[in-house]
Amino acid sequence: MSEVPLSVLFGALAVLIVLSGCFSGSETGLMTLNRYRLRHLAKTGHRGARLADRLLARPDRLIGVILLGNNLINISAASLTTVIALRLGGEGAIGWATLMLTAAILIFSEVAPKTVAAIHPERVAFPASFALAPLLRVLYPAVWAVNMLANGLLRLFGVSLSEAENQHITQEELRTVVNEAGAMIPRRHQRMLLNILDLERAEVEDIMVPRNDIFGIDLDDDWETILGQITNTQYTRMPVYRESIDNIEGVIHVRRLITSLLKGTLSFEDLVANMREPYFVPEGTPLHTQLLNFQARRRRIGLVVDEYGDIMGLITLEDILEEIVGEFTTDPSAAIQDIYAQDDGSYLVEGGASVRDLNRILNWSLPTDGPKTLNGLILEHLETIPEPGTSLVLEGMPVTIVQVQENRVKMARLQPRRRRAIRHSTD
């Protein structure tokens, strides 16, 4: 080394410091990559993403080759610094040289490159992959030996490499990803994605039409009444029964009767012949499961039954889709006919209104883990059938009973704690 010019030694030292920074930056860049974006880019054919994904599949080998190269370079830089110090100032200069090399490596080989890599991981990681992949093949025997010893030591402490491979994103983590997507996903699409995740939390009885509100055809009615129902109905499918919904006979698709209805040839026998057998849905079925059941059975309407087989209500495919995309109306205030906004900021709400719908459309926070309707919520709170004029407080919201019909609350006035305008979506 005594014959090598100092300029060459300083140049070699600078190169080693730069190479050390490249190894340090590549380590941080590869480890901070967004794995899901990385896999997406790899599937689209991005070469750098493919190499990075292949390297990250075995993080022990990746870390092994990076640290092996980094340590070799740092040790070489330390040795070269010692030679330079001896030639410039003798043994007394070694201490100062060590301090200066430590500062140089810390700034130029660690902090600066790792900070850049953390801010722009893809810009650092993808080019680095083109160098690390062939380097891993060249140094594989040494990397394999180091990994074997290191992995053996980790097993003694109960650490398994398979744990990293089994880590998948959870539903709550996915929810956070969607919420933090910002402008990358339109707000309306974010709500739809979150609503899909929420389907698992809701059950069919949360959104079903209660049995008292089911509109159907009673075969025991006279033919003129039945004909009027078919002519004026706003529904495409209706249950058909005798005397009560408990004696269900089938479900009729009104469109199948249109031709005969227009010709005036529709008969009772045609009605019965076009009925389809009813489809029953057990209570407690999650909405995401029922959506798949509707698809598999090619049905669009089902009758919810309890454990005794008694009909509790009716659920349609449209009801579930509305949980995802929102109400099929242009005016959110008209999305539920059971809600009537008043000039003083209060709301007249029919007792059969769904608690989930009240929360979603009016941005309230009434409890949904108990009764499914406002009437049920009031009765559970009071534990008795109230008289008109009775007042109570639900979740900090004053409620006044306006009308009681038989054994249920027909209408109630709700006064939110502060005036909440129904927001119209513009995105």
Image (cartoon, rainbow, N blue to C red):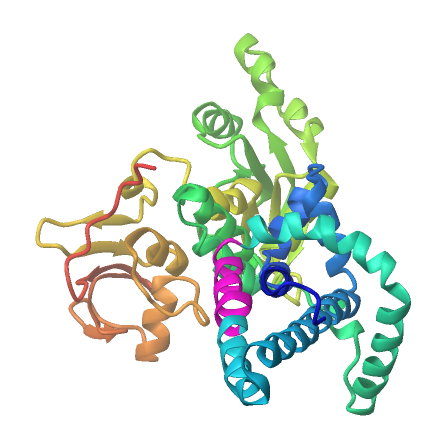
**Main SS type for the magenta part?**
helix
Q: Is residue 231 left or right of residue 149?
A: left
- Of 384 and 37, which appears nearest the observer? 37
Above-or-below relation of 197 to 232: below
Q: Is residue 412 left or right of residue 357?
A: left
Measured from the top left, where is residue 293 in percent x and y? 70, 48
Measured from the top left, where is residue 62 in percent x and y? 75, 64
Q: Is residue 382 in view?
A: yes
Q: Is residue 67 left or right of residue 324?
A: right
- Of 22 and 165, which appears nearest the observer? 22
In the image, residue 414 lies in the stretch drawn in magenta? no
For the N terminus, the image quarter is bottom right
- Of 395 and 136, which appears nearest the observer? 136
Q: Residue furthest top?
A: 263
Residue occupying the point 51% across, 49% down: 193
Q: Is residue 326 in view?
A: no
Measured from the top left, where is residue 284 in percent x and y? 61, 64
In the image, residue 118 lies in the stretch drawn in magenta? yes
Residue occupying the point 66% across, 22% down: 270
For the C terminus, the image quarter is top left
* Magenta extent: 106-120
How many numbered discs?
Answer: 0
